Image (cartoon, helix red, strand yellow):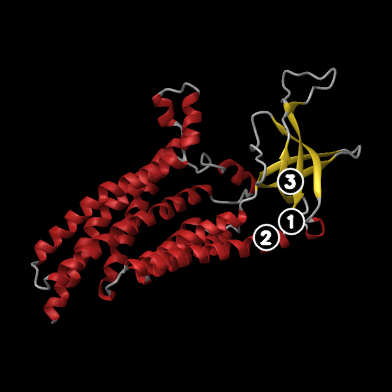
Amino acid sequence: MLKRLAARIVLAVLLSWAFYSAIDYFALHNWNNNDSLIVRVIEAGPESVIPFPEGQDQSDAYEMLERTTVLQVLSDTARSEELLTVKTVRLSGSGLEVIAGRRYLLVWDMFSDGRVQYSIADAYRVSLTAGIVMLVCTLLIALTGLRGLLALLGLGASIAVLVFTVIPLIAQGWNPVILALISVFIISTVTVLCVVRHVRFMLVSLFGSLGGCFCGFGFGALMVYVWQLNGLAGEGGALLASTLPGLNMKGLLLASVLIGSIGAVLDVGISITASMSEFVDYDEHIPLDRLLLAGLHVGNEVLGSMINTLILAYIGSTLPMAVLICSGGVELAGVLNDPYISQEIVQSLAGTLGLLFTIPATAFSFVLQESFRRRND
């Protein structure tokens, strides 16, 4: 058993390395960004401050740093052996720490006098990201087998629905709430089909999860109406509204409530269904009231950790903005009244209420189905 497991892990590592190498080769040979090059830093000299031009007001000026850097071009096959010795610049306090031997994106600006200014825009991480994602996926399959593969398929389908259908249609002006409702139903159905082991209990998981999600959505919609939130205070909300002026920002906020909570709600609904199905498999004549109580107890146990997961996920995603708000010396009342914080509170509380409703919805649905089955046996 241990030998087979070790062999699977080794195979997962080898497959990930091969995938990383293939993506790296493809990216380097097909990099078509005319404004940047993938380069490897051969040598990076010390940085020095660029002096300000004479007569320039330095009160509002940013200090610029310059260093001589030797680079090897990687993304241009015609220049793959070429070494560039250029002076790269960056603003003081910004930019990456350039390390010899690592790969970066080199960009440049051409001025009217013919002068070229080079800078290191970012680290090159395309192939490494793909390799790490592949490693996690293959390890999941190696350790969990078919269930892990099905879970990945469900995740892939969910991402595809959101990235290739919902988000483009929202950008085209479609109603975000309707699209979110449809996507939540599709994601829930696909996840239940891929994850729930007992076919006869799939509808239970689906009904309980959707019921909890829609309950949380209704509560979130009520809070948005009562608090008069317009969706413009979120990350990039004002920028998005100015870029796509016809977009329904309040609807987008409500859509984010739906999509943001479905993952945790599905987790609770499927966990309760799996636990209750195990009880039925162990004793198919277990009293229904005892089965219901067991499902509620399991749900209450799972709820504590899932609420932590949900709330901490929202706090973690908004931590930079929260620190920025608090750094200004704002009082607690001002923080709670801030529309950005209010939107995050709406999403957190709506998701929490969705989890609370999912527990009895799933447990009662399971008992009702089991009662119907026993009457017809």
State the residue position of label 2. Answer: 27
The quarter of the picture where residue 53 lies is top right
Q: Quadrant of residue 191?
A: bottom left
Q: In the drawing, does residue 321 fall left or right of residue 244?
A: left
Q: Quadrant of the N terminus?
A: bottom left
Q: Is residue 348 shown above or below 31?
A: above
Q: Residue at x 52, y 63 (%)?
A: 16
Question: Callout 3: helix, strand or loop?
Answer: strand
What residue sits right under mark 3 in the picture?
106
Determine the secondary structure under disc 2: helix
Q: Is residue 353 left or right of residue 136?
A: left
**Image-based side of 81 in relation to 262, left or right:** right
* As drawn, 120 above or below 203: above
Taking depth in this image into account, of 188 and 337 the one nearest to the observer is: 188
SS category of the residue bearing label 1 = loop
Q: Position of residue 27 (x, y in %)?
A: 67, 60
Q: List x then y, in percent, for residue 302.
A: 25, 52
Considering depth in this image, is 145 or 256 the residue closer to the camera? 145
**Viewer-nearest residue: 377 or 137:** 137
Residue identified by numbered label 1: 75
User: What is the C-alpha distance between the residues marked 2 and 1?
Assistant: 8 Å
Specify the amino acid type for callout 3. Leu
Residue furthest toward the right? Answer: 113
Residue at x-position 66% and y-position 39%? 98
Amino acid carrying label 2: it is Ala
The residue under label 1 is which amino acid type?
A: Ser
Q: Are the residues flagged by discs 2 and 1 in contact, CB closer than 8 Å?
A: yes
The vertical placement of 291 against 101, above or below, is below
